[in-house]
Amino acid sequence: MGRIYNGMPAKHLGSEGWHKPWSGGNGGSCVEALKLADGRVALRQSTDPDGPALICSHRDISVFIRGAKAGQADFLVA
């Protein structure tokens, strides 16, 4: 695999290993996550698996998850 970067086609990261940790009753539109070998995390939209991937550092995804658990992202669903 070549260089991994934000906005790259998610299909270039392969089709194996993607998970839907935030899946729910939303009609199949989910965020999928893939842990990369270097510890970063790739995110993609499940309805567009070949679309762009957002690449997050291990630190950034950890801070986001801790903040979401603490309610800091509640404004997104209010």
Image: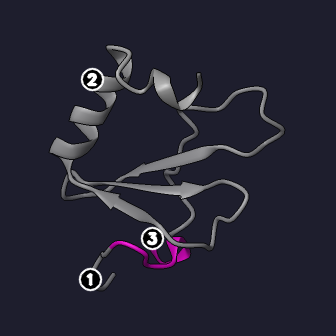
Say whether residue 7 is magenta.
Answer: yes
Q: Residue at x 41, y 27 (%)?
A: 73
Say few, some or many: other residues with alpha carbon within 10 Å of mark 2 (under 14 / 14 to 19 / 20 or more). few
**Count of numbered badges drawn on the protein:** 3
Q: Which mark is residue 13?
A: 3
* 45 over 25 or under it: above or below: below
**Is the Cβ of the residue at disc 1 closer than 8 Å to that at disc 3?**
no
Spatial CA span between label 3 and label 2: 26 Å
Q: Position of residue 10 (x, y in %)?
A: 51, 70
Say whether residue 77 is magenta.
Answer: no
Residue assigned mark 2 = 66
* 34 over 15 or under it: above or below: above
Residue assigned mark 1 = 3
Mark earlier in primary sequence (1, 3): 1
Give the residue furthest to the top: 70
Spatial CA span between label 1 and label 3: 10 Å
In this picture, which residue range is highlighted in magenta?
A: 6-13
